[in-house]
Image: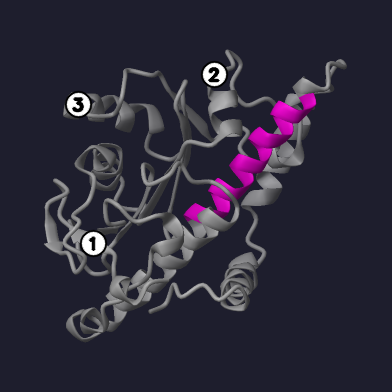
Amino acid sequence: MSQRHIYPQVRESVSDAEWTQRVHLAGCYRLLAHYRMTDLIYTHVSARVPGTAGEFLINPYGLMFDEISASNLVKVDHEGRALLDPTGLGCNPAGFVIHSCIHRARADLHCVIHTHTAAGIGVAAQEQGLRMLSQHAMRFHGALSYHDYEGVALDADEQPRLVRDLGPLNKAMVLRNHGLLTAGETVRAAFDLMFYLERACQAQIAALAGGAAVRECSEAVAAKVARQFCEPDGSELHDWPALMRMLDRLGQAYSD
C-alpha cells in the first residue's frame, strides 16, 4: 500500500482500545477484499469506538478495501460527520444511513457489515429468500430478517423501517434486491456471520443453477442446526487470529 495512506500520528492520538478496534476493523476490510466481497468503494463496515455511544470508525470515501489500514479509518459521529479524518477524504454519508440507525437502535451491536455480492444480491432477488439447502444456511434458521427495497439508501426516513425489520434480536438481514447485512458484538462476530451468510447464498445460487430438483432440509433439522451453532465452542479464540496470520502472510499492512 502506498505510504501516503498510512498515518503514524493517529496511533499517538487515540486510546489503546480505539487502536485495537481500528486494527480489527482494518483487518475485516482486508478479509472482505480477499474473499471478493467488495463493490469497488461503495459498501462499508463500521465499528463503534470502544467506550463511546456515538462515535464510529468507517472507511475513507475513495480507498479500496485492500487499502484500508488502522490509521486511515475515519472517525465519525452518528450523522457521519468526521471527527478524525487523516486522509481528508471523509466518508460516504449515503453509506452511513444504514449503519447509523442500526448502531443507534442496537447498543449490543458494535460492528455492522453491508455487502453487495453477486450471490447475496441473487438470493435477495429470489422470492423465497434464503432456503435451507445447506448447513451454512441452517445456521440462520429463525434468525434472518428481511427488508424490502425502497431505492438507494439515501433517505433518513427509511431508517425506522430498517431498524424495525432487523428487530431486537436478529443480527443478519437480507436487503431485498440489494444485498446482505450482518452485525455483531465484535468485528470478528460480524465478519463470521457475513462469511457464512455469503457462503450460504453462494451455495443456494449454485444449487439452483444446476437445474436438478433440490433437497431442502426440514424445519426440525434446520432448527436443530441453528441451536447447535448457538452453542459456545470457542471459535473466536482460533479463527480470528488465524485469519490475521493469513493477512500477515499475504503482506497486508492492515495494522499500520
Can you identify the residue that label 2 sits on? 125
Residue 139: tell me if it is visible.
no
Q: Residues within 10 Å of mark 3 (few under 14, many from 20)?
A: few
Q: Residue at position x 42%, y 77% from top?
A: 255
Q: Main secondary structure of the magenta part?
A: helix
Can you identify the residue that label 1 sits on? 74
Label 1: state its secondary structure.
strand
- Picture coordinates of residue 144, whole percent (x, y): 53, 33
Quarter of the figure with residue 101: top left
* Alpha-carbon span between mark 1 and mark 2: 32 Å
Viewer-proximal residue, 184 or 27?
27
* Alpha-carbon span between mark 1 and mark 3: 22 Å
Q: Is residue 144 magenta?
A: no
Picture layout, residue 251 above or below residue 186: below
Name the amino acid type tagged 1. Answer: Val
How is this picture coloured? one colour
The residue positioned farthest toward the bottom in the image shown: 12
